Amino acid sequence: MSRTILIRGARLTGGEAADLLLAGGRIAEAGTGLSHAGAEIVDADGLIALPGLVDLHTHLREPGYEASETILSGSRAAAAGGYTTVFAMPNTSPVADTAGVVEQELALGEAAGYVHVQPIGAVTVGQKGERLAELGAMADSRARVRVFSDDGFCVFDPLIMRRALEYVKAFDGVVAQHAQDPRLTEGAQMNEGAVSADLGLAGWPAVAEESIIARDVLLAQHVGSRLHVCHLSTAGSVDIIRWAKRRGVNVTAEVTPHHLLLTDELVRGYDARFKVNPPLRRDEDVRAVREGLADGTIDIVATDHAPHPDEAKSCEWQAAANGMVGLESALRVVQQAMVDTGMLTWDDVARVMSAAPARIGRLDDAGTPLVVGAPASLTLYDPAPVRTFARDDLRGRSVNSPYLGRELPGEVRWTFFRGAVTVEGGVVAPEMPAAGRA
């Protein structure tokens, strides 16, 4: 339920302190010295106010894989991390390749009430890469899908990829590519390099990612369509995106928090929490993607939140599933990797974690600046504390976080979704009243 709340003394995107009055699900007033009879007061001294975070790459697993996550549990995890919008990837069962499935996901998100769950449609039927899915029907559905991806699988056939890029132009859609040449990564277990050689594990070469990106930016240029590159992870990939943007190609790219911070050296312990697709790369790649995010070559940070049950990770490395949970830790990792190192300001964080992902996904009412009349979707973040990330920080069904036991800065103190309080004083609301749901 939307409440009338007066936030006092928050630093808007890290700048000067100001007050915000939230009423009727929107920002009713902004300024200093505000007052409002009967409003609940939130003392935000020392807290940074950011537009509600938007994740363009979340795996919520429902329908079909509810043992790992549900839309409700994933929505709670998102709220805990400061998110108010998440885009749900289509690798569910059934695959989200029809209007019926994406509308079901939208309705489940509305019923949960913690965040806006925006479905992503599959590019191909069953994500099999053989023929295009019902792109137009999903775009025209109540879910109004504008992002399409076979994430988890590369759209490898260049003709299929070209046709998809051509098709989505009709409704200003975007194809989000999982850049992985399947032939070059057969049997791959980790990044190809010195560490894989030491461990005797089959390597995952950087060129498997880079070659697909190079092909697809040329296809996007040829047909004049929008391309988005998922979870970019190598220095060479950054170079290709930089080159493509200089040529005027309409391409955007994302990097995950874990590729901003973690390296393949962590694989030496054979802890499957560090097994992910694309794999953790070299320190040189981490430096390159940080620089790419800082200079605008990489547009956004996206979590690639990928929950798995314990049995999928508590096994030998070769048999373990790829993926990490990341919603609850993303903002804290970005602070450590990018803000505390001086590479991004908090205003930049608002851009790469709120405004730009909403723009790429064509959501007009998400990631908006904190101005009068805007939706009251925001997070209040305390950058000061430094503490060990623990299982109690996780709000989803799975605990496969690579940050357990690691010190991270910051804490989400409050999250507001269209005026409804989803996180209060660091505690996720136990449920969202029906009247407050979208």
Image (tube, grey):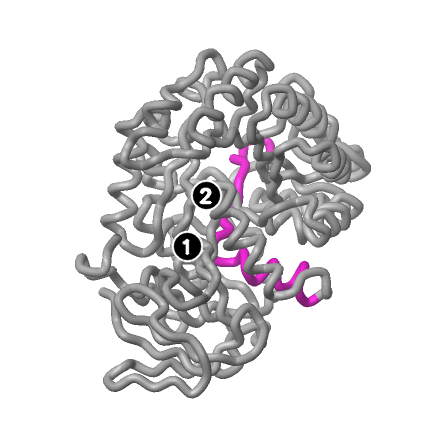
Q: Does the segment drawn in magenta span residue 350? A: no
Tag 2's secondary structure? strand
Q: Which residue is mark 2?
A: 58
Camera-side residue of 419 and 34? 34
Distance of label 1 from label 2 (alpha carbons): 9 Å
The answer to whether mark 1 and mark 2 are in CB contact below 8 A is yes
Tag 1's secondary structure? helix
Q: Does the segment drawn in magenta span residue 334? A: yes
CA neighbours of label 1 inside 10 A, class few (<14), some (14 to 19), many (20+): many
Q: Quadrant of residue 62?
A: top left
The three-letter code of the residue at mark 1 reads Ala
Camera-side residue of 289 and 190? 289
Considering the image in quadrants, where does the N terminus appear? bottom left
- Res 75 visible: yes
Question: From the viewer's perspective, is 297 left or right of 311?
Answer: right
Q: Which residues are magenta?
A: 318-340
* 315 in relation to 366, above or below: above
CA neighbours of label 2 inside 10 A, class few (<14), some (14 to 19), many (20+): many
Q: Position of residue 246 (x, y in %)?
A: 74, 36
Camera-side residue of 140 and 285? 140
Q: Position of residue 217 (x, y in %)?
A: 66, 27
Question: Going from the N terminus, do you reach mark 1 or mark 2 first?
Answer: 2
The three-letter code of the residue at mark 2 reads Thr
* 303 in relation to 209, above or below: below
